[in-house]
Amino acid sequence: MAWVAGADVTTGDLITAAQWNNYLGATGSLEHLGTPELWVPASSWYDNSGAVWSAPTWDAAELKEADDRAYMYFKVPDIFASLAEAVIVVRPLATQAAADWDIYANYGATGENYIIHTESDLATTYNVTNNQFFEVNASGILTALAAGDHVQLILINKNSAHDVGVFGFFMRYNA
């Protein structure tokens, strides 16, 4: 099938490089292919006993004590233009009317200080239900995010009664 600008395309359609270049040149963007996304699993967590743990593939970083924390690290894709959505995906380990989890972001580009941008949300609490996925909005702590930035995200459990499993970070962005 030869692709034509504006035509619907489906998975499995076969094209040549020349057709792709022609299609991209005619449309001027990849917008029709959807909004790019990035998933970053929690890579490690620290519990207040001083232990540092590495997160297995699907298991969550389980924060069960006050000041336990989960870390996520990533580099912003080079095609990033603006943020559309940014959430930390968690599984609360108890039903809470005001789960107290703080979130932090430290980031900067190659050649910049690694904490040239430091932002946090220490005030928001969350109404959550035991064992139901919940998304903590992180867009408010990534206000200066740019292509190529190296990012460290941290979620800290501020209360030992507000246990949470942290799976990772999901970002949808405009290219």
Image (spheres, rainbow, N blue to C red):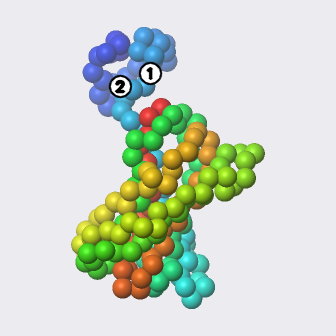
Give the residue type that dot 2 points to: His
Q: CA distance from mark 2 to mark 1?
A: 8 Å
Residue plotted at (48% across, 32% down): 175
84 vs 25: above or below: below
Q: Are marks 2 and 1 in contact (CB under 8 Å)?
A: yes
**Which residue has dot 1 on it?**
29
Residue 70 in percent (x, y) is at: 50, 70
Query: What kind of element bears circle 2?
Result: helix
Which residue occupies the extreme front position in the image?
A: 123
Q: Which of the two residues, 76 or 11, is positioned nearer the viewer here?
A: 76
Residue plotted at (29% across, 16% down): 7
173 vs 141: above or below: above
- Quadrant that contains the N terminus: top left
**Which residue has dot 2 on it?**
32
Residue plotted at (43% across, 25% down): 30
Query: What kind of element bears circle 1?
Result: loop
Q: Residues within 10 Å of mark 1 (few under 14, many from 20)?
A: few
Residue 51 in percent (x, y) is at: 59, 83
Q: Is residue 52 left or right of residue 5?
A: right
Q: Which of the two residues, 97 or 72, is positioned nearer the viewer here?
A: 97
